Every structure is written in C-alpha cells, then in structure tokens.
Amino acid sequence: MNAVARLREDFARGKRRPLRILGASGQLGYGIPSPALRAGLDRAPDMIGCDMGSIDIGPAYLGSGTMAPTHIGARRDLRKVLHAALDAGIPLVIGSAGSAGAAPHMEATLEMLREIAAADGLAFRMASIGADIPRDTVTAAMRAGRVHPLDGMPDLTEEDVENADQLVGQMGLDAFRRALETDPDVLIAGRACDTGIFATLPVMLGFPRGLATHMAKIVECASLCCIPGGRDTILATLDDESFTLESMAPQRAATPASVAGHSLYEQSSPYEIIEPDGCVDLRAARYEPLDARRTRVSGAEWIPAAKTTIKLEGARFLGHRALLLAASADPRFIARSVDIFDEVAEIVAGLVCEDSAPDYDLRFRVYGVDGVIKWPEPPAALPREVFVLGQCIAPTPERAQEVIRTTKQYLLHHGYDGRLSTAGNLAFPLTPPEVSAGAAYRFNVYHLMETDDTAGLFPVRIEEIREP
C-alpha cells in the first residue's frame, strides 16, 4: 500500500488524532540542515512537504526554463527528502518544481528523481501535476472578459500571451487533491500555491480548511517564522481546533510575535490569505505560547470565493544584458550623477548608433542614493561613497558589451561642472568592470484568470518508478 493510501485508511478507520506535518525546506536546492531534518523525522511525522520555487526570484528562471539553484544542490536536497520519506513510509509533496514550475523545470526535477531512484535502488509511485496553461485557453478567457490584471499590471493582450516564453498558472488545493487521490508516495507539482503543498492532505482527512491553510502558509518557509529566523526543518502539529509550531533546530523559537508576523508574509492584507477558490480570514486568529520555543495558533476561518481564479505568470525575453560595476567617493560626482548619466548616455548613443535610433536600453542605479527604489526626494545628506550599476539590454551579447564598454570609458572621463580631477570619476571593484549577465526577461503576464475547469488546466500524471 502506498504512503497516501496508508494514511487515508488510518483516518478512515476512525483513528482521529493530531496530524504531524514536516516542513523540510523553505526552498529546495539551497541545502537542508541535516540535524534539524533528523530531529523532525524522530518525531514520526505523517508527511514531508517542500516548496521548491517562488515568484521572488524574478522572471529570468521562468522565461529561460532553468533552475535557480544549481543542479548539484537540487539533486542533493531531493535525494535527502526522498530517502527520508520513503524510509519513514510517508508521503513527500513538493510544489513549484524546479523554481518556476513550467514544463522544463518539471521535467528536470522528475529526471533527477528518476536518476536518484536508479542509482539508489528505490521504487515508488510518483504523481506529477503540470502547470503550463494553453495559450488559446488564456486568449479565450480574455475575450470573455475573465482575465484581470494584478499589482498595477496593464490589461493583458494577445501579443503578451503569444510572446511569453513560458506561461504557467498557480494551482491550488484542488489540483493537489486530485493527485493525492491517486495514492502516490511522491507528488511533484508545477507552479503552485505554497499552501497547497501542506494543506491538501489535512483537508482531505477532515481537518478545518482555515486552520490547515493558515498552518501551510507558515510552514512552507520552514523555520523562517522563528527567532532567529532560519531555513531549518519545522514541525506543525494540527488538530481540529489549532496547530502548534516547533522548529527542529533548538536555537530557533517559534514565538507568538514571530509567528503572527510571518502570517503577513507575501500578503497584501494583514487579515486575509488569498487562495484560488477562497481566502483565510485571520481576524479571529490567536497566537499563544506553549513554552519558550512553541506557539499554538487557532481561530483562522475559511471563506469560499464566489469565483475560482488562478494567477497566470509569464515571462518575455527582452534581450541580452551587460553590466558595468563601478563606484565613486567624489561628492561632486555623486551630487551631479543624474545629469552626468544623461549626458554620457547621449554621447554613447551618438557614438555607437551614429544616425540610427538606439536599439538598446541603458540605465543606471546609484546604490546609496536611489538604487533600491526611486525616492521622491533626495537624501538630506549625500552618502560619502556610492556603488554605480550600469545596465544595458540589447539584441545581442556583442551589442550589449559594445554599449556598456563605451559607457564605461566615457563615464570614467566625463567632464562636468565642478569637477576637480581629470584622473577619473569612477573606482572599479574588479577588472574588467564590464560583465555579461546573459539573457534578460521581464514579467509580461501577471494576471488573474477566472476558470470553471481546474482539472483540465492542471493534469495529473502517474509514474511507477521501479527498482533497476
């Protein structure tokens, strides 16, 4: 009998008891501290869950179809949690496979698991859920007025849909449920809501959805909810009225304040956790200490949505990126930097383009002044030194390098009002200061799509991994 089937049968026989959920890793592929994982396994968990991806890493990995961690790191962590789950006879659930959860990420993740199984002589039943959304489905929904922008994005166009190098939807609990109903030992999902990884099995076993989803939103980041925050394995123990959180690293404490603060993670509202088919209302949530390291959480309520929506994510190739890494400790340069950049950009355009229009995008950020965000006003006192990041995105790597190298030379020696030294305006932290940074992408699809057919959008595939 497979891992999920054993657990479902156990609860079906009326053996109602708390459920123990192990959040092994906040983002698979960057290392799992072994002492905390072993401590968690010693507590006899009922399942192991891992988040493997995020929107936080930006559009490049989605657009390019590559993983954010190294293959060495991803394979190491996959092997560790796979052996842990199979040895314990409990399900392993992984979401947002391969960082961004599109078909290339999913296939790379599945192939690593097959290779691990072949090398280590493992056999298991594996379910996988694809997250790639057909473009004609999105186009039809757009024409029906069922696609809406998020976070200040413009209305989606058919050109946006066509030009996205990868296009995925963020699956919720329903997709995980359909996969878990096939009784797998291992479940690998494409781009997914983090909560689906950890909340689905508890909901299937009859635990309250509000509590299960609130728990899932916290444990998907492992011990990040603790003081001090970290990525060590965390244990959540869920019953019908509450859940208890405990880091498996003894130096980390899940306190009421730290857990409540983490409930706001990635949420625009302090009172709601938005999911595809509803939301968790946290207005009545309570956070109570059990001791110095454990917190009990209760009170979350589930509110169904009138319409089911999924978040669409797409990334479009922009060009090839080259960077200039430089710095300055000249107060006159720092004060005049905005004008200097404009003047140098005009000089460079005249040199590399001559009479044609620029075919590249050249921009600067001054860390110490406005490198992180564009402040509405300049600082009251300028910093004594700054880091200057120049970026060029162009149609080819050669063109990007031509522009950024020309920019370096003219920015270094640009004459401006008040300059005292002609020796150079910049300091370089390394040489060469120009760096080719590969392909550049941007999110061009970040929208909500109403749907009546999540089963059709997120197909489940079953694979029996046999011992070699």
Image (cartoon, helix red, strand yellow):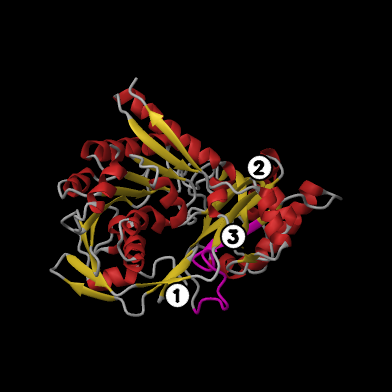
The Cα–Cα distance between marks 1 and 3, rounded to whole angstroms, is 24 Å
- The disc, 1 or 3, on the residue closer to the chain's N-terminal end is 1
Q: At 40% from the left edge and 76% from the top edge, which residue is drawn?
A: 271
Residue 151 coordinates in the image, percent (x, y): 58, 68
Element class at badge 2: helix
The stretch of residues the image draws in magenta is: 363-380
Q: Quadrant of residue 287?
A: bottom left
The residue under label 1 is 269
- The disc, 2 or 3, on the residue closer to the chain's N-terminal end is 2
The amino acid at mark 2 is Gln
The quadrant in which the C terminus is found is: top left
Instruction: Report the disc number at residue 401.
Output: 2
For this view, does 333 lie left or right of residue 248?
A: right
The amino acid at mark 1 is Ser
The residue closer to the viewer here, 420 or 52, is 52
For this view, does 45 lie left or right of residue 139?
A: left
The amino acid at mark 3 is Thr
Q: Can you see residue 59?
A: no
